[in-house]
């Protein structure tokens, strides 16, 4: 069976959930080979093995942290030369999509971004995408070279499938051409205790109807009761009510959680483009004609300041 490279998204060896989803998808089209760049490979290897990695290609070099993107492209290119994979899978993060695009260019192949499903085909892996603000689903494949595919988080359920997970060192040569942009400082992101927005199983978002920054704690309280991430519409972000890093939409982040709750969001196409692939969508809006109600699985016509606190209390009560 052909091997499939899976780029490991991790923090010092702590493997993030989208990578485990990629391993699940990779098993549909071949044998997963994880590519771990940076420190912590020994920590990550047992987790990767538990979820199907037949081996782990590991490389650690200061250039991966000191310079932007390109040294990691060098490493994935080296991995492709070692493995000759049937495909290369990466998570659909901003960095990974840039890595994937640069890798596809070097390999003389094509790239598919933001896939939401993956299956084996007679002529190579076939990816499903949601396009035109999730109004259509398309199936496509790369017709030339090694397919490079980025997959949106929450596109597949994580499934354990123990494999060998043998760690092998990957030799990577990082040339001067890969050192054009140097990282000069880093500032840790403030830890809210909530899950990462794009990876969360549940997202609670507030929009223009929240009315101001002082009212967003109502949204946060519901999110915390559910163990959810907090999102915001473009209108709320542009008004300065919530940080831009939490914006859901075409010009923000795309999410695909199991449950998406939209409070005080009208449902403009810009917002829908970033959340329409959510598995279950619930909306709370006092305007019964709001476009968001054309999209939802469950809709509540009412004032969010009555509905959301009541929902929060009910969740807490059921949790005991």
Image (cartoon, rainbow, N blue to C red):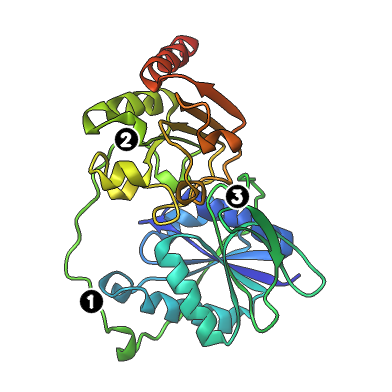
Q: Which numbered tag is attached to residue 161?
A: none
Question: Do residues under tags 2 and 3 come within 8 Å of each other at their CB atoms?
Answer: no
User: Which one is in front in this view, the residue at disc 2 or the one at disc 3?
Assistant: 3
Question: Does 35 sit above or below residue 24?
Answer: below
**Horizontal arrangement in the rendering, residue 33 relative to residue 239 (left or right):** right
User: Which quadrant of the rendered structure holds the N terminus?
Assistant: bottom right
User: Which quadrant of the rendered structure holds the C terminus?
Assistant: top left
Specify the farthest residue to the bottom: 176
Specify the farthest residue to the front: 289
Q: Residue at x 72, y 68 (%)?
A: 125
Question: Does 52 sit above or below residue 301?
Answer: below
Q: Earlier in the sequence, mark 2 or mark 1?
A: 1
Question: Does 142 sit above or below residue 286?
Answer: below
Q: Could you say whether the residue bearing mark 1 is in a helix, strand or loop?
A: loop
Q: Could you say whether the residue bearing mark 2 is in a helix, strand or loop?
A: loop
Mark 2 to mark 3 CA distance (whole Å): 23 Å
Instruction: Write down the residue under mark 1.
Output: 182
Instruction: Evaluate whether residue 46 shows in this view.
Output: no
Q: Which numbered tag is attached to residue 155?
A: 3
Q: Could you say whether the residue bearing mark 3 is in a helix, strand or loop?
A: loop
Mark 3 to mark 1 CA distance (whole Å): 33 Å
Q: Position of residue 2 (x, y in %)?
A: 72, 72
Q: Position of residue 39 (x, y in %)?
A: 35, 63
Instruction: Write down the residue under mark 2.
Output: 193
Q: Residues within 10 Å of mark 3 (few under 14, many from 20)?
A: many
Q: Residue at x 38, y 16 (%)?
A: 309
Question: Does 41 sit above or below residue 270?
Answer: below
């Amino acid at each position: 069976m052909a091997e499939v490279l899976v780029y490991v998204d991790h923090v010092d060896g702590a493997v993030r959930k989208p990578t485990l989803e990629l391993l699940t998808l990779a098993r549909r089209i071949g044998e997963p080979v994880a590519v771990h760049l940076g420190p912590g490979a020994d920590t990550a290897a047992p987790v990767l093995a538990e979820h199907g990695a037949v081996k782990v290609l590991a490389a650690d070099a200061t250039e991966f942290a000191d310079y932007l993107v390109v040294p990691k492209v060098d490493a994935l290119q080296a991995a492709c030369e070692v493995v000759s994979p049937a495909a290369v899978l990466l998570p659909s993060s901003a960095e990974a999509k840039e890595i994937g695009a640069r890798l596809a260019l070097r390999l003389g192949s094509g790239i598919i971004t933001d896939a939401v499903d993956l299956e084996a085909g007679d002529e190579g892996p076939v990816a499903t995408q949601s396009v035109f603000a999730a109004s259509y689903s398309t199936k496509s494949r790369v017709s030339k070279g090694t397919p490079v595919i980025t997959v949106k988080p929450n596109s597949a359920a994580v499934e354990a499938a123990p494999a060998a997970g043998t760690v092998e060192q990957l030799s990577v040569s990082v040339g001067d051409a890969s050192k054009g942009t140097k990282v000069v400082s880093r500032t840790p992101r403030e830890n809210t205790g909530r899950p990462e927005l794009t990876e969360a199983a549940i997202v609670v978002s507030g929009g223009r109807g929240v009315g101001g920054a002082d009212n967003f704690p109502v949204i946060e309280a519901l999110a915390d009761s559910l163990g959810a991430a907090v999102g915001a519409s473009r209108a709320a972000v542009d008004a300065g009510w919530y940080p831009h890093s939490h914006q859901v939409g075409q010009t923000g982040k795309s999410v695909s959680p199991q449950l998406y709750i939209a409070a005080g969001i009208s449902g403009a196409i810009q917002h829908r483009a970033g959340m329409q692939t959510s598995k279950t969508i619930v909306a709370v809006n006092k305007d019964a004609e709001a476009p968001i109600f054309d999209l939802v699985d469950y809709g509540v016509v009412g004032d969010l300041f009555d509905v959301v606190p009541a929902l929060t209390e009910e969740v807490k009560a059921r949790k005991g």
